[in-house]
Amino acid sequence: MKPMRLHHVGIVLPTLQKAHDFIEANGLEIDYAGFVDAYHADLIFTKKGPFSSPLEMIIPREGVLTKFNNGKGGIAHIAFEVDDVEAVRQEMEAECPGCMLEKKAVLGTDDIIVNFRRPSTNQGILVEYVQTTAPITGRDVNPFESLGEAGKLNTSWHPMRLHHVGIVLPTMEKAEAFIKANGLEVDYAGFVDAYHADLVFTKKGEFSTPLEMIIPREGVLTKFNNGKGGIAHIAFEVDDVEAVRQHMEKECPGCMLEKKAVLGTDDIIVNFRRPSTNQGILVEYVQTIAPINRSNPNPFEK
């Protein structure tokens, strides 16, 4: 399978106001907006950047997505860009009959057609495959116009780029199976003492964020999603993680998880904003402090 790049991360939010508040709180910038008939939902895409995929805010008007996470919303899926979504469907169905959600790709926003692989066949992760079929439209749309004054966005205090998407998997075997099934490539690996977990990062691309596979050895992460794993968080890169902590604590006292940034892999320090203060989304803020350590072996090479 051809190596895939991350097209976007899909986040379900129950109302336009909550989407607005999440964008504002995290210093994001809107690229374009649209509507998907197949899933009865408004969509808002944030801007992509160098080595950074956009976010897709999904605001369902009716149907099954209104019940996602008991109506509270959350991180719903990751999406990979492919050249031919039908060819991907055929290849995956040959390997795993019945694994794809749609018999035929459906229209997303005006520029893409999409299909999904069922989470039950993909280590519990809902993955979308996206084929670009036309130019992007909707860049002249204000998705929050209906909110009036409450829908105005302040100038971004710090436009952020998506550093990675964190996915918890209960074992190395399941992490390897997910990487193989989705045509991903390992970049580097490490261990985080603060969270007692092995980490495996996939390769990033020109406008594509890597994935971070988190394989906990012990502690609270072993219980994530009742031990089954899943998409745990999104992470933004910042210049100064302590300055971000101070800014966010000023706006929302007690919102940050750590009093002081903790060491992630050897190259980064990190802090998190509590989901209860951020529309139910766990967001990590990452500051690079050293070169990536690629000396650790690929854990999946025999």
Image (spheres, grey):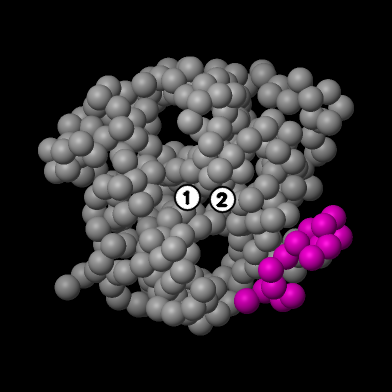
Disc 2 and disc 1 in contact, CB within 8 angstroms: yes
Residue at the left extreme of this rendering: 94
Whether residue 120 is situated above or below residue 12 in the rendered picture: below
Residue 279: give x, y in percent of width and height.
67, 47
Residue 178: give x, y in percent of width and height.
29, 55
Is 131 displayed left or right of 32 in the figure? left
Whether residue 203 is situated above or below residue 172 in the rendered picture: above
Whether 287 is among the magenta residues is no
Under mark 1, the amino acid is Thr
Q: Quadrant of the N terminus?
A: top left
Residue 264 in sight in this render: yes
Q: Residues within 10 Å of mark 2 (few under 14, many from 20)?
A: many
Q: In front: 92, or 297?
A: 92
Whether residue 290 is situated above or below residue 240 in the rendered picture: below
Residue stretch rendered in magenta on the structure: 248-262
Residue holding disc 1: 209
Q: In front: 290, or 118?
A: 118
Residue 56 in sight in this render: no
Q: Residues within 10 Å of mark 1 (few under 14, many from 20)?
A: many
Is 4 displayed left or right of 302 in the figure? right
Under mark 2, the amino acid is Leu
Total of numbered circles in the picture? 2
Q: Quadrant of the C terminus?
A: bottom left
Answer with the quarter of the image where residue 116 lies.
top left
Q: Earlier in the sequence, mark 2 or mark 1?
A: 2
Is 221 displayed left or right of 141 in the figure? left
Q: Main secondary structure of the magenta part?
A: loop
Q: Residue at x 55, y 79 (%)?
A: 194
Q: Which mark is residue 162?
A: 2
